[in-house]
Amino acid sequence: MPRYKTLLLIPLVILLSVGGLFFVGLQDGQDDGGLASAWLHQKAPEFNPQPFGEEETPNQTDLQQPTIKLVNFWASWCAPCRVEHPHLETLKDQGHIILGINYKDKAEQAHEFLRELGNPYHKIGGDPTGRTAIHWGVYGIPETFVIDSQGVIRLRWAGPITSRILEERIYPVLQEFAVTQ
């Protein structure tokens, strides 16, 4: 009987260990949603998503425009994307440019998602194979990148944008680089 109880503790110890490592990663001061990014403080990688219906497709030139912009990877099947959507609408209403990349989604479902919740995107591209996301190092969606007027990634946020994330992470970066443009 004691051996059985010991075996039951092993999964708990593993779970707590992994959870502890994740927590430490979130607390290490990174500006990337707790995940390392090779692109942080580097020029944004190549950007040529596929067309998304009748929407204007973003491209590499959009990343070089002399303004701050956000690139947001999303999908209609992504529950956290629904959670962050009102915050993207807020950013749009404040005049921020958001370039959307629809990730591995069915076109009709993606368009229905935008009809239902609104379209916060200045331009939208498709990524049906996931190649663009892989090239950008996307861990999972939603994931958002803030890019400065020089085309440099200044913040990566892995996970949904919430009110707290807007206030503590997104707005400070937008303000910092708006002053230096």
Image (cartoon, rainbow, N blue to C red):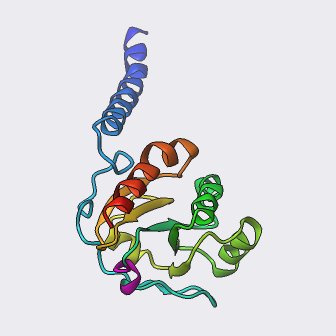
Image check: 21 left or right of 96? left
Magenta run includes residue 136: no
Query: Which quadrant of the figure has residue 124?
Result: bottom right
Count of marks placed on residues: 0
Q: Residue furthest top?
A: 2
Q: How far from the left and from the top, in percent, is residue 165? A: 49, 45
Residue bounds of the magenta highlight: 61-65
> Is the residue 21 above or below the residue 112 in the image?
above
Q: How far from the left and from the top, in percent, is residue 54? A: 63, 90
Residue pictured at 45% horizontal, 67% vertical: 70
Residue pictured at 34% horizontal, 29% vertical: 20
Image check: 8 left or right of 24? right
Query: Which quadrant of the figure has residue 156?
Result: bottom left
Residue pictured at 71% horizontal, 69% vertical: 118
Picture quarter with the C terminus: bottom left
Picture quarter with the N terminus: top left
Q: How far from the left and from the top, in percent, is residue 6? A: 37, 16
State the predominant SS element of the stretch in magenta. helix
Q: How far from the left and from the top, in percent, is residue 71? A: 45, 69
